[in-house]
Image: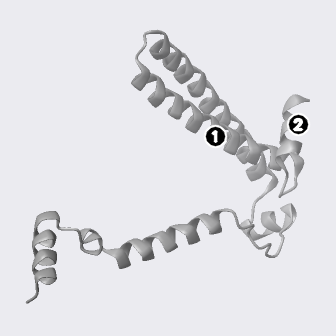
């Protein structure tokens, strides 16, 4: 054993510089590549399959005119229910903000966004039944809401 290998062994014992042993390099590499693939898939446009018309969907689900009317009113009232809950929760969030309770505000604000998303979801389904058309856009729904 030479002088240099003795010094190297002593420094290795003192400083313990072994980055590949500190963390599993292969695991980090594979998990990073999987994360990159997930992010790429998020921004990739979905492939369009076969389009189904509104009347084909009614035929496939065997819905009657009365069933459509019941679904339309049910979706409208569920949407209204979520919207009223969102208004109440936003008032609660505002009181948390004014009392400087920011954790209450953040939790309540996230629930407000969830409730508004649910309200939009059910109202959009209501809108598609009213229009008797599937695949409507956000702009069409917004114009329907304004008019």
Whether residue 53 sits left or right of residue 83 in the image: it is: right
Q: Residue 26 lies in what quarter of the image?
A: bottom left
Q: Which residue corresponds to the image point at 77% horizontal and 51% vertical from the top-left?
A: 68
The residue under the point 62% across, 41% down is 118
Where in the figure is residue 125, as x and y percent of width and height? 74, 48
In screen coordinates, is 18 left or right of 92? Answer: left
Q: Quadrant of the C terminus?
A: top right
Describe the element under mark 2 as helix, strand or loop: helix
Foreground of the two, 133 or 9: 9
The residue pinned by badge 1 equals: 117
Q: Quadrant of the N terminus?
A: bottom left
Q: Give the residue at x 75% y 60%.
A: 63
Give the structural element (helix, strand or loop) at label 1.
helix
- Return the residue at label 2: 144
- Splitting the image into 4 quarters, where does residue 56 fall? bottom right
Is the residue marked by circle 2 packed among few (<14), some (14-19), or many (20+) residues within 10 Å? few
Crowd around label 1: few <14 · some 14–19 · many ≥20 (10 Å):
some
Seen at 63% across and 40% down, the residue is 117
Residue 36 screen position, x and y as percent: 56, 68
* Callout in the foreground (1, 2): 1
Tell me whether circle 1 and circle 2 mark residues in contact (CB < 8 Å). no
């Amino acid at each position: 054993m030479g002088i240099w290998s003795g010094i190297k062994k002593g420094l290795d014992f003192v400083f313990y510089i072994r980055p590949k042993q500190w963390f599993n390099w292969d695991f980090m590499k594979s998990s990073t590549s999987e994360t990159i693939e997930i992010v790429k898939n998020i921004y990739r446009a979905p492939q369009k399959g076969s389009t189904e018309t509104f009347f084909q969907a009614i035929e496939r689900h065997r819905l009657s005119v009365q069933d459509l009317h019941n679904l339309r009113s049910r979706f409208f009232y569920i949407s209204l229910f979520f919207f009223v809950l969102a208004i109440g929760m936003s008032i609660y969030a505002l009181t948390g903000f004014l009392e400087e309770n920011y954790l209450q505000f953040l939790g309540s604000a996230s629930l407000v966004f969830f409730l508004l998303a649910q309200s939009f979801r059910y109202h959009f389904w209501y809108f598609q039944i009213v229009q008797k058309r599937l695949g409507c856009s956000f702009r069409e729904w917004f114009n329907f809401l304004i008019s």
